[in-house]
Amino acid sequence: MEQQKFNLRIPQNISVIFSEKKKTLTVIGPIATKSMKLKLKLIIDKNKKTLSISPLTFSRTSNAEKRRITALRATTAAQIKHLFIESSTTIFQKLKIVGVGYRIDFTENSENKLLTLKLGYSHYFYVKVPNNLNLNCFTRTKFSIFGNSYQEISKLSSKIREKKIPEPYKGKGILYENEVITLKEGKKI
């Protein structure tokens, strides 16, 4: 049972290249090509289209590091699964703004992409969107971030969300799409 979580099935539309000399794994999918550095060796079976993460490292390891190899194998398996998803599908994160007068505006020109947030303060917030990510504004209060990198999308969405974290009394702020805020009861007189 334990061995099974370190064996990954390679999807049909994805090609995998493992370079033991460079210690890298390259995943070629229909949307993107992604690669990552590895600390553990891999075994690829091309007939069964499976990939196994071995407990052997590329370099010599100390006894303290040998104790952490199962954790490192699980982390490597999760990272490889993310590479499979990122190279074959478009990932997105939906956000919504709750509050009277709270608005967003997205401007895009040849040089950069800029998101302008009006969040009830005396000034606007400006967030620069990386070139490998895109934004789609549905309304003035609902938008989505999409691209091929899960890490970049979550980083940008948390950067936008930190401008106005939802407050617990009225629920105003920037929320993820399916997020539910349990409101606290105010003081009673």
Image (cartoon, rainbow, N blue to C red):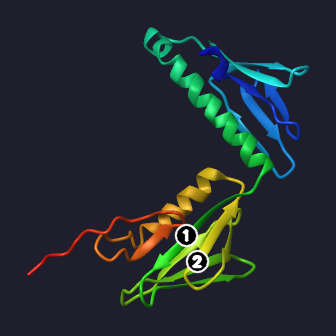
| Secondary structure category for the residue under label 2 | strand
Which residue is found at the position 54% from the left and 57% from the top? 155
Task: Tell me the residue that label 1 is attached to.
Answer: 95
Q: Residue at x 88, y 41 (%)?
A: 13
Q: What is the x, y in percent for residue 110?
A: 75, 79
- Residue 94 spot, x, y in % from top left: 60, 67
Taking depth in this image into account, of 1 and 73 the one nearest to the observer is 1
The correct choice, above or below, for 31 with respect to 104 in the image is above
Residue 22 lies in what quarter of the image? top right
The three-letter amino acid code for the residue at tag 2 is Lys
From this viewpoint, which residue is outermost toward the top?
A: 63
Identify the residue at the far right of this view. 47
Q: Quadrant of residue 29?
A: top right
| Residue 158 higher or lower than 166, as above or below | above
- Can residue 34 be seen here? The reply is yes
Which residue in the protein does label 2 denote? 142
Amino acid on which disc 1 is placed: Leu
